[in-house]
Image (cartoon, grey):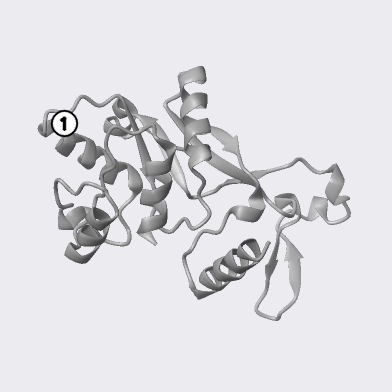
């Protein structure tokens, strides 16, 4: 899967360096085979499933600066992004330049209004989280968005300062049909089905 991210970054033709941060030798080899650099290995305390993104990128920036690189802007691209498009990377970069934002990242519209979200009780009965919207028409409710979970452009200074990517950032809307965040087998199956549809036109 990491090849999709590397290919998208390469095709965007806007990066001076494409670097993969990993603690895994196999991933390192795959990354190098696809043209990325692995000039350092990520330490174990930043390599578990609970580590947030910002400390990982902050560490990567510091390591790259130790190599003598001058770094102004950094784009963190997640590896499990089969439908990332290189033009989105370019558009977000341009938006960042235009707005002088700390961060820019893709967002997608929720397919159903979040104001009508429900929870299921132990009895199986459903209840609205906010009961005042039970009788609201969906088209009358405010459109809401979620992080597409694909990439984050950010100023190097913002990453190093551990600023918040979301609340300190600007959202760039992309179509929700091509947002598949692969976290479980259902997500993988959805991605496979969508890829098959796109391949067959």
- Where residue 74 appears, as percent x and y from the top left, is 33, 33
Nearest the camera: 152 or 145?
152
Please state if 99 lies on the left or on the right of 78 as rendered: right
Is 158 above or below relative to 39?
above
- Where residue 51 appears, as percent x and y from the top left, is 30, 54
Please state if 141 lies on the left or on the right of 22 as rendered: right
Is 125 above or below relative to 30?
below
Residue on which the image places disc 1: 65
Q: Residue at x 46, y 29 (%)?
A: 93
- Where residue 146 appears, as percent x and y from the top left, is 59, 47
Please state if 14 lies on the left or on the right of 98 as rendered: left
Circle 1: element type:
helix
Q: Is residue 164 visible?
A: no
Single out the residue that lies furthest toward the front: 200
Image quadrant holding the N terminus, namely bottom left
Q: Residue at x 74, y 54 (%)?
A: 112
Q: Residue at x 70, y 52 (%)?
A: 114
- Where residue 152 appears, as percent x and y from the top left, is 43, 39
Q: Is residue 88 visible?
A: yes
Nearest the camera: 63 or 127?
63
Q: Residue at x 27, y 46 (%)?
A: 56
Could you say which quadrant of the image residue 50 lies in? bottom left
Could you say which quadrant of the image residue 34 lies in? bottom left
Could you say which quadrant of the image residue 58 lies in? top left
| Disc 1 packing (10 Å; few <14; some 14–19; many ≥20) | few
């Amino acid at each position: 899967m990491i090849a999709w991210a590397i290919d998208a970054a390469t095709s965007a033709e806007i990066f001076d360096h494409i670097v993969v941060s990993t603690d895994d030798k196999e991933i390192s080899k795959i990354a190098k085979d696809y043209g990325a650099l692995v000039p350092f290995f990520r330490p174990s305390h930043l390599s578990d499933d609970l580590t947030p993104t910002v400390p990982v990128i902050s560490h990567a920036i510091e390591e790259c600066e130790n190599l003598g690189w001058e770094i102004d802007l950094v784009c963190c691209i997640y590896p499990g992004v089969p439908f990332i498009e290189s033009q989105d990377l370019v558009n977000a970069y341009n938006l960042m330049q235009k707005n002088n934002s700390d961060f820019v990242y893709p967002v997608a519209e929720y397919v159903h209004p979040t104001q009508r979200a429900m929870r299921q009780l132990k009895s199986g009965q459903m209840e609205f989280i906010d009961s005042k919207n039970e009788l609201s028409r969906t088209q009358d409710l405010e459109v809401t968005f979620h992080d597409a979970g694909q990439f984050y452009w950010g100023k190097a200074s913002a990453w190093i300062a551990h600023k918040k990517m979301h609340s300190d950032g600007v959202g760039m809307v992309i179509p929700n049909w091509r947002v598949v965040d692969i976290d479980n087998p259902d997500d993988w199956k959805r991605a496979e089905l969508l890829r098959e549809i796109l391949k067959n036109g």
